[in-house]
Amino acid sequence: MKRVVVLVMVIALVGCSSASKNKISLKEKYHIDTEAMKNWEKTYTEVIIGESELVDWYGDENPLSYLAKNGKITEKKAKFLSSLATKKEITEDDKEEFNSTLDGIVKKLPRKFYLKDENLKDPIGLTKYMVAQSKEQIMTPSKYIETRVATPEEWNEIVVFSKKTDLDEKDVKKLRKLLNKFIKRDNFFNKNVWYNVEISPRVMEIDKIYDKKNKTKLEMNNVNAKALYIAYPGYFSELEKWDN
């Protein structure tokens, strides 16, 4: 029995070792050489876009502007990167610092979005819109949420909110918690329903992630959070501003 346990442990260790060996570094994946380092702005932009599952990970804007605006890169690091363009020779220390800085930024890219109270721009308007949309003939996101995602009790909460003239702070908190519950559920997104809303690159983006086999919790959350954002334009702040 002990021999079997030891054998299993050895196989697991070999598997882990093999997986780590097969993992491609950013340097290899993007063919980062000294020329790429000198053209660091182009290289960083390409890598950040390539490694982001959603454009919202870098605010759907110029990646370098996003890094600067959100303090994702220090002034010291920015000066170092800028200095590479005029260097006659890129040293081994330069290469190591370039790659470690890039690796650090990419590791911080993944975001698991969820709503804060302040991300709801028009809570009462949202509930009224959801209830009205749920009564349409075609399968809308609201009708889908009512019939496939929410429990009868949960949907009734939204209906009760929609009948008020306004939502107080406590109501907004309840609504926000309810919506965050929805986006945690595996069945929240249905591509046929969302293509009824719009046929666009952003729906195609989450559809592509949704179709992946063995999705991670992060991937599922990304799909659902962006699906909620797409379903109700104007009722939420930009996804990039949601908490994570």
Image (tube, rainbow, N blue to C red):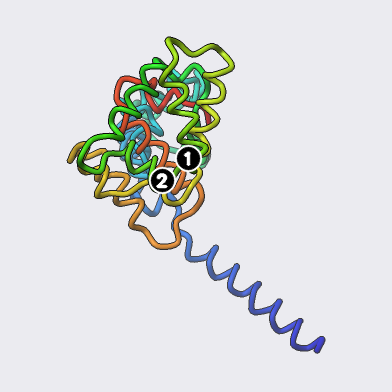
Q: Is residue 193 above or below residue 75?
A: below
Q: Residue at x 52, y 19 (%)?
A: 172
Q: Please name whichever residue, 5 or 27, is drawn nearer the observer in this view of the structure.
A: 5
Tell me whether circle 1 and circle 2 mark residues in contact (CB < 8 Å).
yes
Q: Residue at x 45, y 35 (%)?
A: 155
What numbered label is drawn on residue 188? 2
Horizontal and vertical percent for residue 42? 29, 33
Q: Amino acid at mark 1?
A: Phe
Residue 132: name its quadrant: top left
Q: Position of residue 141 (x, y in %)?
A: 31, 39
Mark 2: amino acid: Phe
Badge 1 is on which residue?
Answer: 182
Residue 32: image location, x then y, percent: 36, 46
Q: Earlier in the sequence, mark 1 or mark 2?
A: 1
Q: Quadrant of the N terminus?
A: bottom right
Q: Position of residue 219 (x, y in %)?
A: 44, 48
Q: Find numbered disc 1 in the image and state the secondary structure of the residue it sits on.
A: helix
